[in-house]
Amino acid sequence: MEEAGFENVVERYFYWPVGAWAEGEYYKTLGAIFQHNLLAALEGMSLKALGMLGWERERIVMLIKEVEEEITSGKEPDEFFAHVSYLGSARLTVMESSC
C-alpha cells in the first residue's frame, strides 16, 4: 500500500478463539462471544452466499446444521485469524496548471 502512495499504513493481526476453550479469562470471554455471533450470523450468510451459487435451500440448511454441530461440539478447537490493514492518510499530488 505504501508503494501505491499511501502514508501511515497500519497493519494489525487479530486472533479469536471460537468458543470458551482458550486459556485466560480474556480469550475465554472473547471466544464465547465470537462463537455466539458466528452462530447467529451463519444461517443468513450461508443462505445468501450459497443460494447465489445455485444451491437449494434444503441442502444449505442441512449444511448449516452440520457446521453448527461441529462448532459447538468442542472436539477440535476452532480459531480465527485476521490480518487488517488500514490507512492513516493518502499522499496527494497537486498538479500545476498552465492556464
Image (tube, rainbow, N blue to C red):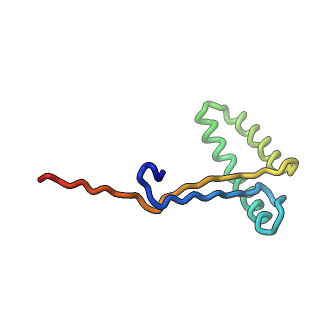
Residue 76 screen position, x and y as percent: 85, 48
Q: Residue at x 61, y 40 (%)?
A: 49
Residue 26 screen position, x and y as percent: 76, 68
Residue 66 versus residue 29 in the image, above or below: above
Total numbered badges shown on the rendered structure: 0
Q: Residue at x 38, y 58 (%)?
A: 91
Q: Residue at x 76, y 37 (%)?
A: 62
Apparent side of residue 35 relative to residue 56 in the rendered image (left or right) = right
Residue 32 screen position, x and y as percent: 77, 61
Q: Residue at x 61, y 41 (%)?
A: 48
Dividing the picture into quarters, in which one does residue 19 lie?
A: bottom right
- As rendered, which of 9 and 83 lies closer to the eye? 9
Residue at the extreme right: 75
Residue 82 versus residue 47 in the image, above or below: below
Residue 52 screen position, x and y as percent: 58, 35
- As rendered, which of 56 and 16 lies closer to the eye? 16
- As rendered, which of 28 and 71 lies closer to the eye? 28
Residue at the extreme front: 3
